[in-house]
């Protein structure tokens, strides 16, 4: 469906009170057209209807006319540069952005993410959450391995006890 037709559907969905459907359509459009700031603005408006300032701030982050409290809520939810980079769902170089402010924001996030990871990153190879948020993963892995070991030992103990009882 062409962009104009989908936006007409979004308007019809909002008029009919089908906010979740409108949100889903807009999320799909932003995914298909990540450099369209108007689509991001429309998606932010829908999240305002939900009363979700962090998500509204997420989609208005590249807009100069953004609300400071929504931006703060976004930055509080997505605390690190890699998390923000993933959340912005941008693809391609910053030069595709429609405004100088958006290009500046994107470049700043990418540079902060590169600094945090210790190597250059770009918008087409956004680091996964496993690469960037692995602080607790070693401990979590240790706990998982310990749990598996306990389960295997319990199974073996029950098996040995059953075997011994069979021959008594």
Image (cartoon, rainbow, N blue to C red):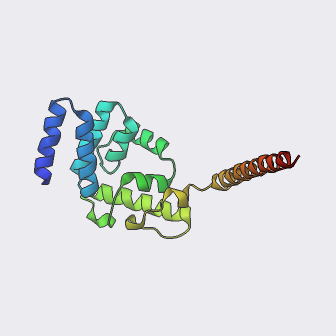
Q: Residue at x 26, y 50 (%)?
A: 28
Residue 93 horizontal side relative to residue 7, left or right? right
Residue 69 horizontal side relative to residue 5, left or right? right
| Spot occupied by residue 149 in the image (x, y as percentages of width and height) | 74, 53
Residue furthest out toward the right = 168
Residue furthest out toward the bottom = 120
Which of these two is toward me, 4 or 81?
Answer: 4
| Spot occupied by residue 20 in the image (x, y as percentages of width and height) | 27, 36
Residue 42 horizontal side relative to residue 116, left or right? left
| Spot occupied by residue 65 in the image (x, y as percentages of width and height) | 29, 44
Could you tell me how many numbered marks the image carries? 0
Q: Residue at x 40, y 51 (%)?
A: 87
Which of these two is toward me, 45 or 14?
Answer: 14
Residue furthest out toward the front = 167
Q: Residue at x 77, y 49 (%)?
A: 159
| Spot occupied by residue 125 in the image (x, y as percentages of width and height) | 42, 67
Q: Is residue 14 above or below residue 34?
A: above
């Amino acid at each position: 469906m062409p962009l104009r037709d989908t936006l007409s559907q979004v308007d019809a969905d909002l008029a009919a009170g089908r906010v979740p459907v409108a949100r889903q359509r807009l999320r799909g459009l932003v995914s298909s057209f990540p450099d369209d700031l108007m689509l991001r603005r429309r998606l932010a408006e829908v999240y305002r209807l939900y009363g979700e300032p962090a998500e509204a701030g997420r989609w208005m982050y590249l807009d100069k006319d953004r609300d400071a409290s929504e931006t703060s809520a976004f930055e509080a939810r997505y605390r690190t540069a890699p998390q923000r980079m993933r959340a912005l769902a941008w693809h391609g170089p910053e030069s595709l952005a429609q405004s100088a402010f958006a290009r500046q924001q994107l470049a700043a996030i990418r540079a902060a993410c590169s600094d945090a990871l210790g190597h250059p990153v770009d918008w087409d190879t956004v680091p996964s959450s496993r690469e960037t948020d692995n602080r607790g993963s070693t401990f979590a892995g240790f706990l998982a391995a310990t749990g598996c070991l306990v389960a295997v030992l319990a199974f073996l103990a029950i098996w040995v006890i059953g075997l011994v009882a069979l021959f008594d």
